[in-house]
Structures are given as C-alpha cells and as structure tokens.
Amino acid sequence: MGIVNISHRDLMSVESPGRYVGGEPNQCIKQEVIDSIVNTGSCKEVRTAFCFPDVYEIGMSNLAMQILYNCLNSLDYVYCERAFAPWLDMCNLMREKNIPLYTLETKSALFDFDIVAFTLGYEMCYTNVLLMLDLGKIPLLSKDRTDKDPIVICGGPVTYNIEPMCDFFDAVMMGEGEESILEVAEVIKKYKDSGKQSRKEVLKALSKIEGVYIPSFYEAVFSDKEGEKTYYTEAYSRIKKEDGTVEEVPVTFKGVAPVQTGLRKLEPEAPDVITKRIIKDLDNVLYPTDPIVPNNGIVHDRAYLEIFRGCIRGCRFCQAGFIYRPVREKSPDTLCKQGIAIEHNTGYDELGILSLSSSDYTGLKELTDGLLDAFEGRHSSLSLPSLRIDNFALDLMEKVSSTRKSGLTFAPEAGTQRLRDVINKGITEEDIMASLKLAFTGGWNTVKLYFMLGLPTETMEDVEGIALLARKIEQLYFDTARELGIKARKPEITVSTSMYIPKPFTPFQWERQNCKEEFLKKQSYLRSLLKSKNIKYNWHDVESSLWEVVLARGDRRLNKVLLEGYQSGLTYDAWDDQFKFDTWMSLLEKNGLSWETYARNYDTDEVLPWDHISVGVRKDFLLSEKKKAYDETVTPNCRVKCSGCGATCFKVGECVASR
C-alpha cells in the first residue's frame, strides 16, 4: 500500500491534466487515514474507490457519484475516493511507465482498496470497466481474484440486466444505493476487523443484503428447440492443455440458436429473486449540499437539485419510467434549504432542477418561488428541464430562464397521434401546438424536437408525420407573428431522431429492433422531407444503437465477447470516433452469436436474462401494457388512476390498486 508517483512532466504531456490531479473544492480529505497510509502502509478504515468508467468531465457530471461519495464518507470507518477512466493518451503513458490507475484524493492504486465500486449509467461503457480494472492491477474476472484483491461491485440503471458483464463483478447492487452501500461497507468492515480473508464468506454475507446480487452464486441455463440444455459454467469452463496453456471451450449447441431458460442457484442460501432497493423518505436521506466543484469544465457544469424520483407517465418505451417507480417527492421546504446551501457552498451561478419530468412535481411553484426569492440579486439562476408540453407555463419559464429567448426543448417522440398513443406518450398534437403558440407569443423562436425511429408498429406514414409536424410548427411561428402584428424573425427548429432500443423492464422488452437497413431508409426518407432553411435535422448513429440493444438485452454469453473486445483494444464505445461496429459484429460471429440473437422478437413466455431481478413492476402488467400498445389504447398517468403495476407496494406496503 502506498502513494502512486506521477511527475508533473508526465501530466503535462497528456490532454487535460486537470483530470488526474484532484484537489478540488469540497473533496473529502480524512487526514488521519491519509497519515496512516503514508506512515504505516495500512489503515483500519474501509477504503472504497468509487469509479466512473468514462472521462472526468462526464463522471463529474454524474449525480449518483456525488451522492454516494458523500454517503460513504459520512461514516467514520469509511474513506471513499474517486477514480475515472483515463483518456487514451494517459492510458498509453500509464502502461509505458507502469503507473497503476489511482484515485484522486490520495493517489492510491485501485488494487490497494477494500471495495472498488462502479456506477454504470449506460451500456456503452462496459469495456471501460475492464480498462480501469486492468490499469488498476485487479484481475478482470471475479473467479480469478484472491482474498487479497478488492471486492468489485457495481450499481446503476443498466445493472438491472448485468448478465453481459456478470463475470467481472463480485456483487451487484440493484436499485437506489444510499442505504445499501452503507450496509455493504458495514459487512466489509466486520470482516476486515476480524482478520478473516475468505472472499466466499464475504460474498455470502453480502448476498443477505436486500438488493445485492452475487452473480457467481448462479449460472445460466440455455436450451435449444430440441430440448438439450447447456450450463454456462460448463460451456465456458477453462481447461488446461498438456503444454500448460489455458484454452476456453466454446459453447456448442445442436439445432437452432439457444434461448436462456433461467438461472440455477449454485449457492442454496442465495435468493431466488433479487429485489431492488428504494429510498422511501427522500426528505431524510443524505443529499450533498457541498458537492465537489470540478477542476475542469464538465459536461453539465452546474449544481443540481433532485426534486423527486420516479415518473407518473408510463411511456411504454422508457426504461427509466418503470425502473425508478414509484414516485417519491421531496418537500419544497427541504429543497429550498438544500438549494440555498448548494449555491452558497459551491459558487455555482446556476442550479439545475433534476427529475424525469419536472412539471409533474406537485410543489413546483412553491419551490421555484422560494429559490428565486433567495437568489434575487445574487446573479444565480435556475435551470428547469424536463417540462412536459401539456404542462408548459410561460410565466414560469420567463421567471427561471436567465435568458428569456433561450431555446426550448420538447420530446413528442412520435410524429403521429396513432403512434403517440401506441407508446402512451399522453399528449396530442393540439397540446403541442397550443404550447408552442404560447412560447412563440412569449418571444421564443428556437425549438428543439426529439423523436425516435423504429418504435413498435411504426410505418413510413409515422415517419412522414415527423416532417409534417415540424412543418406545422414552422407555419405556426409565422402565423403567430402575423397575429401579433410583428415582423417574424427567422425561426430555428431542430428535429433530432434517435434509434429506438427495446430495453428490459418495459412493455416493449419483447419487441424486435429495426435492422440497419430499416433505420437508414427511415432516416433518408425523413431527411428528404425536411428540406427547409428554418428546419435542421440531426440524427443519431445507427450502428451504435444496434450494438446497444445487444448489450441491453444480452445474456452471459456476452462476457466472453466483451473480454475479447477489450483485449482487442475496444474501449470508449460511447465515443463515435472510437466505436468499431464491424469488429464487434465479428466477435459475436466468432462466438456463435449475432445481432439478431438479441434484437429479435422475443416470445412472451420465454425466460429473459433479467427475470431473476424484480423492479417492483409485475410482468403481467408489462404484458397488459404491450397489448394496449397494439390496441392503441392510452393508460392514464399514475395520479389520474393507479394501474396496479406493483411498484407502489414498495412504498406503502400494500397494493394501491386494490383500495
């Protein structure tokens, strides 16, 4: 145990050296722990390296990291530090000079920690996890780690299907982590104090914590249509050849491509179903009012105030809307106190209001009035994203916007009413036009519109509907100016489309994804319809969306693919200039898999790789929502009528729909 030495000369040779030095305002310094590390090479505290598998500028914009960093450091017996994925030039330098990946607070190598924890916000960061473990001198595979290695854990929204990465993690935390991460630290502290070094016993103790999943205590079972079963651990068992080298045995199946038929427990005491954790009382859970202020400019360079969790809307394409249920709000009084403290402790002049749909917060007027009164004369402003079109309020936007004429962003998602009903968007074209007319009347002329291509049941008429809606909005702008008797400025209307990716725990989790040719055809057609000097069309890369669905709906067979991808030099897949689609497709084929294996239409009665995880929303509810989608039937939002999805039972201990 010790401090990693890296010279100023080396740091000045890489891009953005501020990523690697630490020392930011409000970082946690526990001097007694640091002194113990320097003087004795050890400490009694549970040392945790909190890792974000992307560059500093992105990781420091992640609210979950700030929250859990503060939670862990609130315990006297824990010292939590931060580490981020180095950019490629720094990776090369570290390998060349044998410098291990280190934390920012004490410059300690990752292998010196008791816990190495990753927060995973998106699937395209998976090989960056392997990059950080590798640079941190930690064995990549859980089964190769010894009692002297850290316990490697992860959490975050994508871990609800962690099967593609499960071989690399010792433990996975499902759901909100403010309470469970402290329970994990308590278990590690107990074993550290006792001097016991049995990794298996630690994992057994962790498996008893609600919401903690130990992947090595289970194995996947695959079968083909002929009924022949293959067990994952047997299929990929490592055999040693006569010359002493190790060979991976590939999976072989008779007949057609296999499907997963569930998990079998290797550890009898492990739970059959792992249930997510939620925080029931947001007012009384720790929230950082003195977050770390970064050295570099970051992606979202402002302070944040989280006003509630969950969403009442039930859009059928939206994974966040289901996995974060039920809705739980903070009180306006608590939020005002936190917002004022954050502004005072950070020096930020902008406070972002954070939620899935800010206009659904019941105390929004009281909150914004309170904060604006507190910030008056202090040159501090509020940022209020995620306003729904049907709840748009011009007076509110005028009060919170630092610039009245700043652009507005709306997400109709689909171009026709039929398709908006399919996805349960819950807004009409009349809602959209009325809201935008109000905005244009108030002086706005810049509008961004977000849509998805490839939604279930989508036709070319639905694609055309996107262009027709954009044209109607363009005409509305000029008609509004004429009604007001003013000279119209040039409107700036941006239409952006992303590729729809069916995600676990949504009513569309069984749906097929459009193929590359279908996506490109729809993009090309829409581009041909949006030729106007007032309308700009942006579109998302197709190939990265095709790879993302593989990761989102994948199973344990992808662990080997991802390992081989990392060993081939594939990292930073979320960055367009680093992503190599053809290489990934070749690796899938080499391992007897394909894009179609995971992008296909799933039978509703087959076992899905994530079926052993519970987010509280029942599968029969998702199936009923899938049927309603094809019937083009809208489900009312949760405040209008409880649909009995099951998630609210987490909060109140009973089924609200049965009242």
Image (cartoon, helix red, strand yellow):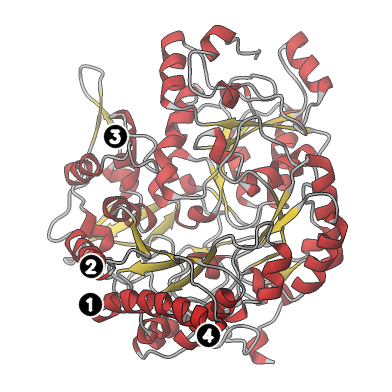
Calculate the distance from the C-alpha at mark 4 to the C-alpha at mark 3.
63 Å
Q: Amino acid at mark 4?
A: Glu
Along the line of sight, which residue is nearer the eye, 267 or 40?
40
Q: Nearer the viewer, mark 3 or mark 1?
A: 1
Q: Secondary structure at mark 3?
A: helix
**Disc 1 residue crowd, few under 14, some 14–19, many 20+, Cα 10 Å:** few
Image quarter where the C terminus lies is bottom right
Residue, x 62% and y 68% (percent of image)?
310
Quote the CA–CA distance across marks 2 and 4.
Answer: 36 Å
| Residue 631 placement (x, y as % from top left) | 36, 91
Residue 124 image offset from top left, x and y in percent? 40, 46
Q: Which residue is mark 2?
A: 522
C-alpha span from label 3 to label 1 = 39 Å
Q: Earlier in the sequence, mark 3 or mark 1?
A: 1
Going from N to C along the chain, the mark reached first, 4 or 1, is 1
Give the residue pinned by disc 1.
460
- Please name whichever residue, 65 or 339, is drawn nearer the observer in this view of the structure: 339
Circle 3 is placed at which residue position? 564
Q: CA distance from mark 2 to mark 3?
A: 33 Å
Q: Circles 1 and 2: CB distance less than 8 Å?
A: yes
